[in-house]
Image (cartoon, rainbow, N blue to C red):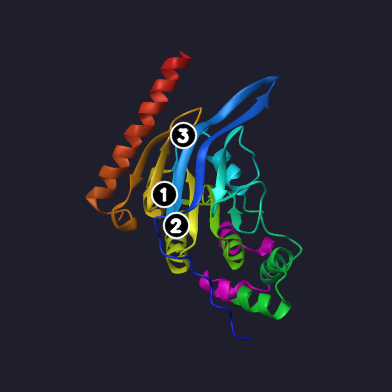
Amino acid sequence: MAVPALARAPETTAVPALQVEGVTLSYAVDGRTVTAVEDVSLDIRRGERLVLLGPSGCGKSSLLKSIGGFLPPAAGRVLLDGRPVSRPGPDRMMVLQDFEQLLPWLTVRRNLVAALSWAKRTRRGEAEAIAEDMLQRVGLARVADQYPSTLSGGMKQRVAIARALALRPEVLLMDEPFAALDAMTRRRMQEELLALCEDTGVTTIFVTHAIDEAIVIGSRIVVMTAHPGRIRAVIDLPGGRGPDRGDPAFAALEAQIGGLIADQIGRTETADG
């Protein structure tokens, strides 16, 4: 069976793929309300790679969960193609930090086929062709018949990304997916993800607290304040890509962003003290 072409998102246009409008997110903790994110508004353009960057506890993962439909806003709303987001759906696929995202009783190939069958009602033959194509794209066709327990952490994350992209989501949501990897594997995964995003054109929202990772992956970086999370700055990278790691501009941008984050942490510590 011929492999169906992997859908490429439309080129970036003035019409946003996703809108975050005045979103505030709150939790109940010990009988009191704690605000994680306060009055955040963003337009995410089609095909861009938006990185949410900030210190631990700034609410970036909470904001990602709200975009995914897992956490309803206390105020504001999230719109996908102009429609309010009210629940999770295969149009917004999420990849998490945890290596154990795959079904351990299914082979690598069957993990992809099962997701296509359950979420998209894809016929078996077509699902297997899509699975094979995606595993080729992430360089893991050779382990298609192995079980997740035989894979390294980096390989498991590549399978999780392949499974998410196999469903042809409108938005790919990634919550620090490489944080638990060793430094060399993490760098390789960053480059592989960048190539996949550029190849497929999928709109991507990526959460990290690592400044260098944000520069490598993002076409736009949103720097959030310390708790509660608000938007501190938005940095558009020229040409939709950051400078190469060895370029002096990379170090300069890293220092600039680091200063923004350190300033916010310092203000929070002063207020708490």
Q: Give the magenta range.
A: 133-159
- Residue sitting at the far right: 105
Query: Percent position (x, y) of residue 194?
Result: 43, 61
Q: Which residue is more in the foreground, 265 or 10?
A: 10
Residue that numbered label 2 is attached to:
190
Residue 264 figure quarter: top left
Residue that numbered label 3 is attached to:
55
Comes first in the chain, label 3 or label 1: 3
Q: Is residue 220 in sight in this rendering?
A: yes
Compared to residue 210, the image places residue 125 above or below, namely below
Check disc 2 and give the amino acid type: Gln
Dot 1: what SS? helix
Q: Is residue 141 magenta?
A: yes
- The total of numbered circles placed on residues is 3
Check disc 1 and give the amino acid type: Glu
Q: Is residue 250 left or right of residue 71?
A: left
Dot 2: what SS? helix
CA gap, disc 3 and disc 1 = 14 Å
Q: Is residue 188 magenta?
A: no
Q: Quick one: label 2, few (<14), some, or many (20+) residues within 10 Å?
A: some
Q: Which residue is more in the foreground, 156 or 42?
A: 42
Numbered circle sitting on residue 33: none
Residue that numbered label 1 is attached to:
213
Q: Is residue 209 in sight in this rendering?
A: no
Comes first in the chain, label 2 or label 1: 2
Q: Is residue 145 left or right of residue 266?
A: right
Q: Are marks 2 and 1 in contact (CB under 8 Å)?
A: yes
Query: Percent position (x, y) of residue 269?
Result: 44, 19
